Amino acid sequence: MRTQVGIIGSGPAGLLLSQLLDLHGIESIVLERRSRDYVLGRIRAGVLEEGMVNMLRLAEVGERMDREGLVHEGFEMAFGDRRFRIDLKKHTGKTVMVYGQTELTRDLMEARDARGGRLVYEAEGVAIHDLDTDRPKLRYKKDGLEHEVVCDFIAGCDGFRGVSRRSFPDDVLRTHERVYPFGWLGVLSETRPVSEEVIYVNHWRGFALCSMRSMTRSRYYIQCAFDEDLEEWTDDRFWDALRARLPHEAAESMEIGPSIEKSIAPLRSFVAEPMRHGRLFLAGDAAHIVPPTGAKGLNLAASDIYYLHRAFVDYYKEGRSDLMDTYSDSCLKRVWKAERFSWWLSTVLHRFPDQSTFDRGIQLAELDYLADSEAAQASFAENYVGLPF
Ligand code: RFL
Ligand code: PHB
């Protein structure tokens, strides 16, 4: 089989790239290791930056998001006995959209199906060959048969544990990493959200986050040990732990109910440089990870895809390769700023096991400053709604 762009991974990055390329008349095939249902069963991100929202509309997958997504003009933070709001709209003129990654993935899959997109699920042992030639190949197995796809280019959209990044020669790739000494325990429940806006909580017992997927479906997280046993977290234990960290009024008014999903996510910051080697381009979690605190992971995947699809369009339509040459640098500039923001927010909001009284004092001073300073809030809001791309 022959294609222009071979895409590994059908997460938001891979699907969005194939959709944008198709709208520009560029052929692609998406190879996904998992089943479609498995991909749709993952509960992940929920907050989309305005730049990403606009991109989804351009990609002709924004209709349901515009109908069902919740536009948020601000969010709240709580620490000690203080609770304050950051007004995103006032400080930036922009808003964010609360719309689940699961829904977005479903919209993208349906859009690909409607346009006859080529997606192969349960593709086993996907491997990259002949990367040092101008016709790299993807080989995989499906239903016991071997397949080969000859490509002009390969887009590695296969997440943190994929094969693409590992296909870079050792002497080319530099990696930078920070692993945090805790995780997030997340619960999805068919309950009314405790507040109309997202609430981030710094509590001496540990971080908590109140989010949502709709006005009848809540998404809550609490900081937990990184090696926590999920089995030990009954719903009752989760609700008690969450309530103990929330501001009093919120804890009192929170509706509780059975969980419909419960999972633990580790927290990590990670950057791989460069994001391109020859005809292989990395995008999204394959190249970088942020802790979820700043809600940046999915949005970074989308901005990578913005740069990458433009580079391919320029190549196929104008015969130019300069955007390919600048791809890695353009992405990484934005990536490092989102890494900084996510690291800073994670550092300020979580309880660290080895935290000294000095560290705690600095955390509270950071939050106090943010609560009282319009300048600090404006800078925070600028990052939260997303830096331009
Ligand atoms: P994905 O979504 O991991 O998709 C990669 C796909 O590649 C497949 N794959 C392979 N396919 C073929 N062959 C192989 N060898 C393969 N290896 C892997 C995988 O099965 C998968 O389908 O990466 P992508 O597309 O780059 O998207 C990134 C986002 O999913 C991720 O950054 C976000 O979910 C992060 N994130 C958040 N981001 C936000 O912008 N806002 C948020 O509010 C937000 N909240 C979150 C989050 C991530 C979380 N977790 C679970 C880590 C909250 C949480 C709890
Ligand atoms: C979510 O709704 O899953 C969510 C919201 C805000 C974050 C992270 C995750 O910062």
Image: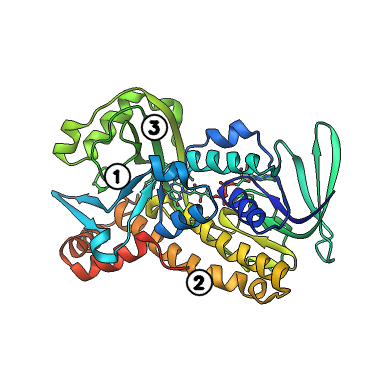
- Where does residue 240 sit, x and y in percent of width and height? 26, 29
- Where does residue 208 sit, x and y in percent of width and height? 30, 43
- Which residue in the structure is indicated by mark 3? 188
Q: Earlier in the sequence, mark 2 or mark 1?
A: 1
- Which residue in the structure is indicated by mark 1? 206
Tell me the SS state at disc 3. strand
How did the renderer colour the structure?
A: rainbow
* Residue 157 drawn above or below residue 324: above
Q: Earlier in the sequence, mark 2 or mark 3?
A: 3
- Where does residue 364 sit, x and y in percent of width and height? 21, 58
Q: Amino acid at mark 3?
A: Leu
* Residue 80 drawn above or below residue 313: above
Q: From where the camera sits, is residue 104 visible?
A: yes
The residue shown at (44%, 36%) is 228
Residue 99 image label: none
Marks 2 and 1 close (CB-CB < 8 Å) = no
Q: Nearer the viewer, residue 310 or 153?
A: 310
- Which residue in the structure is indicated by mark 2? 333
Q: Earlier in the sequence, mark 1 or mark 3?
A: 3
Give me the C-alpha separation between circle 2 and circle 3. Answer: 34 Å
For mark 3, does the 10 Å Cα neighbourhood hold few (<14), some (14 to 19), or many (20 or more) residues? many
Quarter of the view holding residue 152? bottom right
Tell me the SS state at disc 1. loop
The residue shown at (21%, 49%) is 78
Give me the C-alpha separation between circle 2 and circle 1. Answer: 32 Å
Give the foreground label among 2 and 1.
2
For mark 1, does the 10 Å Cα neighbourhood hold few (<14), some (14 to 19), or many (20 or more) residues? some
